[in-house]
Amino acid sequence: MTRAEEIAANLTEVRARIAGAERAAGRPAGSARLVAVSKKMTVDDVRAALAAGQRIFGESYGQELRDKRAALAAEAAPPEWHFIGPLQSNKVKYVAGQAALIHAVDSAALLDAIDARGVPQACLVQVNVAGEAQKRGVAPADLPALLDRFASLQFARCEGLMLIPPLTAQPEDARRHFAALRALRDREATRGRPNVDLKELSMGMSGDVEIAIAEGATLVRVGTAIFGGRST
């Protein structure tokens, strides 16, 4: 089996998992979209996934997103790029206006840097639901203030929330964190704010896709189950 065939076969399996989870949760087909996490993978790997019908790809490094976007811009159906990793303000120039969605806005300073680029940019707010000291994301109590900040800006808009749950041996342990993010979204969605439409929940990875979808994920970020392991 070639590398391209392996990626295509893996994509078929992941799509089947997503479809099965949607059915089990009583959700419409296609209500959970797959973000293929392609960070540290080659342009040829992304091209193979494109050939297998994948359209949304997630990158975590600004220059890597820039380079892959340029390399694949001439494809008949170019990728839709999402930026899913932590973003430093000095790297915003590589991402704002280039990614269809930035998943991990976690501070007013970063949000202001994105807006200052002067181009429309859809974002998600990363929430540190579990309160992990080593992990980025706003505390749940600070979420309303950051959403209020979106309302005052011109170019950045918030389309939902994102989280990375604690790493545990049992995927089921992530359920309560997914449910907590959904509850936060539902609470804040009742408050009307300009530039804020909390329609997306980005949560769930290779090991816990089904649980995330059961708890309302609209975007699942899957890398290892598609491309295999990576060096970092």
Image (cartoon, helix red, strand yellow):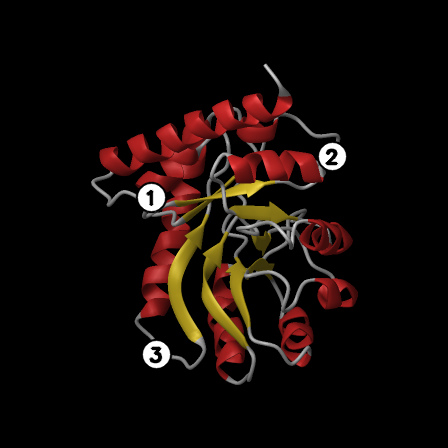
Amino acid type, mark 1:
Glu
Q: Mark 2 sits on what residue?
A: 232
Q: CA distance from mark 2 to mark 1?
A: 28 Å
Measured along the vertical axis of the image, is residue 82 above or below residue 46? Answer: below
Measured along the vertical axis of the image, is residue 90 above or below residue 195? Answer: above
Give the residue displayed 74% in from the left and 61% down from the top.
88
> Which one is closest to the eye, mark 3 or mark 2?
2
Q: CA distance from mark 3 to mark 2?
A: 40 Å
Q: Mark 3 sits on what residue?
A: 192
Q: Element under label 3? A: loop
Residue 192 coordinates in the image, percent (x, y): 34, 79
Amino acid type, mark 3:
Gly
Label at residue 215: 1
Q: In the picture, which quadrant includes the C terminus?
A: top right
- Say whether marks 3 and 2 touch (CB < 8 Å): no
Residue 190 coordinates in the image, percent (x, y): 30, 71
Q: Mark 3 or mark 2, which has the lower sequence index?
A: 3
Measured along the vertical axis of the image, is residue 123 above or below residue 118? Answer: above
- Say whether marks 2 and 1 touch (CB < 8 Å): no
**Residue pushed farthest left?**
26
Q: CA distance from mark 3 to mark 1?
A: 23 Å
Give the residue displayed 73% in from the left and 63% down from the top.
94
